[in-house]
Image (spheres, coloured by chain):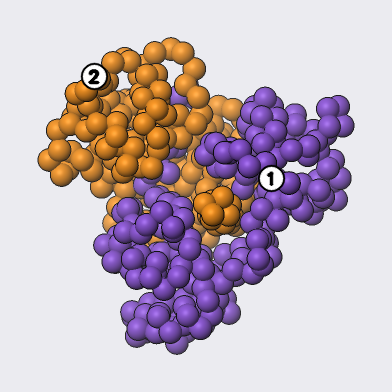
Chain colours: A purple, B orange
Amino acid sequence: MLKKQKIPNATLDRLPLYFKYFKQSEDNGIDRVSSREISEALDIDSATIRRDFSYFGELGRKGYGYNVHALVKFFSEQVQGTGMKNVILIGVGNLGSALLNYNFTKIHDKIKIAVAFDIDQHIIGQTINGVEVKDICELESVVQDIQAEVAILTVPGQVGVDLSSKLEALGIKGILNFTPEKLAVSNEVTVHNIDLSVEMQALLFYMKHNN
Amino acid sequence: MLKKQKIPNATLDRLPLYFKYFKQSEDNGIDRVSSREISEALDIDSATIRRDFSYFGELGRKGYGYNVHALVKFFSEQVQGTGMKNVILIGVGNLGSALLNYNFTKIHDKIKIAVAFDIDQHIIGQTINGVEVKDICELESVVQDIQAEVAILTVPGQVGVDLSSKLEALGIKGILNFTPEKLAVSNEVTVHNIDLSVEMQALLFYMKHNN
């Protein structure tokens, strides 16, 4: 279904927002949405929405709107691939704990943190929201046992950099990087950076330009 | 210095990344960077970088690169405006605590959380990383006293929605929204949404398209 042409990064950035919107609409029993409704809900202009969707073939019809179920199915297929992905989380501090308590499955039933790691003996052995915290020494054996593909890094910056090349060697294919550092991985590993100070900076930029 | 033409959202989204890169370069004693160096560090193609910078007038010269100090100054001016912004944080759970412990001033010396709020009597009165946690009942008087302009919402979704219209009435101009809900504010308030499940979804999309 996905055309082979290169999808712009700006479009890819919006796909999770679209997915979330369609999933919520479906949960609310809505069958069909117009690009204007999407536009109002997500604050993205209609022309951009129509252009984004043009990369995915015929998902909507003019004057009819988009079929919510078909779109949820389409977006799900885009991420599910071969099925469940085992996710590990490294660093059970405040942010790591927040993520462990976060209900990812609400938005996507294939996302589940399987196991967490830390170096602190007071935390190791605890179970947070059903996820066991293991000693980081066990990283190698556990990642291979459960064939984890995705890692969430909520550790101090330099620790994350040091860990990242190890994670790549262990077969991790995607990293959600909450450290402010650039990780030491090849192009084979997809990294999505979330730097909270950059997000704060972004808010201030938008405030400035909203005036 | 900023041209009056409308800057695309995709460009605005990248500004904080540019700012962070230039700030780090300056901290490392680097005077000048090329668009290729920026491209490699941030994984954004050079043409996009040059186009983004074209919105801000003559910040670089062909074959010479960009002056790091001038750019840091430019970006700082973009966000600083009239000076220090008082930031409040509402909801001192794991994520709120993580943000209180986060050193925002590392990237921008005008960002400082002035005060935090919660409803839990066990947390109220504590000081986290120098920030006092006050009773949410004091929200109105404190926000007016310190003339807070920015709020960080790390509360459950519906609580955030209910609080948001109150915050607007109190004069808050920008909200960093960590709830998964759409806030109930007018266009006068700039909202920057960070939904952690959307970020996880984004990573899976990118992994899919990186293959």
Q: Is residue A211 above or below residue B144?
A: above
Residue for point 35% across, 65% down: A164
| Residue B122 shows up from this direction | no
- Dot 1 corresponds to which residue? A2
| Quarter of image, res A38 | top right
Relative depth, front residue between B95 and B61 = B61
Quadrant location, the C terminus of chain B: bottom right
The amino acid on which the numbered mark 1 sits, given as a three-letter code, is Leu
Residue B173, horizontal then vertical, whole percent: 48, 32
| Quarter of image, res B52 | top left
Residue for point 29% across, 31% down: B35
Q: Image check: A112 left or right of B40?
A: right
Residue B192, horizontal then vertical, whole percent: 51, 40
**Helix, strand or loop under label 2:** strand
Relative depth, front residue between B35 and A107 = B35
Check contact, mark 1 vs mark 2: CB within 8 A.
no
**Helix, strand or loop under label 1:** loop
Residue for point 52% across, 48% down: B194
Relative depth, front residue between B148 and B16 = B16
How busy is the neighbourhood of tag 1: few (under 14 within 10 Å), some, or many (20 plus)?
Answer: few
Discs 1/2, front: 1
Q: Image check: A144 left or right of B195?
A: left
- Dot 2 corresponds to which residue? B61
The amino acid on which the numbered mark 2 sits, given as a three-letter code, is Arg
Q: Which residue lies furthest to the top in this view?
A: B4
Task: Name the chain letter of the residue that bears numbered label 1.
Answer: A
Task: Name the chain letter of the residue that bears numbered label 2.
Answer: B
Residue A146, horizontal then vertical, whole percent: 54, 80
Q: In this view, does A183 lie above or below B161?
A: below
Residue B139, horizontal then vertical, whole percent: 49, 47
